[in-house]
Image (cartoon, helix red, strand yellow):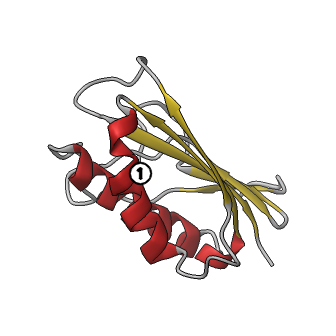
Amino acid sequence: MSTSKRISIDVGGAEHRSPIPAASRIGNFMMTGHIYGRDPSDNAIVAGAENQIKLIFSNLRAILAQGGATPEDVLKLEFKVTSLDLRPAINKEWSAMFPDAASRPARHVELSGNIAKPAEVSCEAFIVIS
């Protein structure tokens, strides 16, 4: 049994190939690693950027739940994308997860050429659990 204050969070669809958890929590702070559009049933990245984005938000919800958090606890999301043309698809899922314009987390979308295919987008979350 671990005596560490840090707790590793793992969920299907957000698994890493390396021995890295999907997220880590210490006290009321939780941070994810990169979340990809992976299918929870087989951990494979799905085809199509819009499908990947839908699964990223679904996988984020699963990580939040496993870590004892809710979307209201998300402080910031950072996206890496292969094309800035993916913003409308991100905005659609973003607005569904955070419908109150007066209470949305900070967000950054960054163009990156370092995303391993077939992934077209990834996301990291910074969470403060209330």
Residue at 47% across, 71% down: 95
Q: Nearer the viewer, residue 107 or 69?
A: 107
Q: Is residue 41 above or below residue 36?
A: below
Q: In which quarter of the image is the C terminus?
A: bottom right
Residue 43 in view: no
Residue 124 in view: yes
Q: Nearer the viewer, residue 114 or 23?
A: 114
The extreme top residue here reads 113
Residue at 39% across, 25% down: 115
Left or right: 27, with 8 as reference point: right
The extreme left residue here reads 47
Picture quadrant of residue 49: top left
Q: Is residue 59 above or below residue 4?
A: below
Q: What element carries label 1?
A: loop
Give how far across and how far down residue 38 sits, in percent: 29, 49
Q: Nearer the viewer, residue 1 or 109?
A: 109
Q: Name the residue under label 1.
A: 14
Give how far across and how far down residue 4 sits, in percent: 82, 52
The extreme bottom residue here reads 100
Residue at 24% across, 52% down: 50
Please tell me how many numbered marks the rendered image carries.
1
Give how far across and how far down residue 8 sits, in percent: 63, 54
Picture quadrant of residue 89: bottom left
Q: In which quarter of the image is the N terminus?
A: bottom right
Q: In this view, does 116 lie above or below 130?
A: above
How dense is the environment of label 1, judged by Cα within 10 Å: few (below 14), some, or many (20 and up)?
many
Residue at 85% across, 64% down: 27
Q: Which of 23 and 51 is in front in this view?
A: 51
The amino acid pointed to by label 1 is Ala
Give how far across and how far down residue 75 sits, in percent: 73, 61
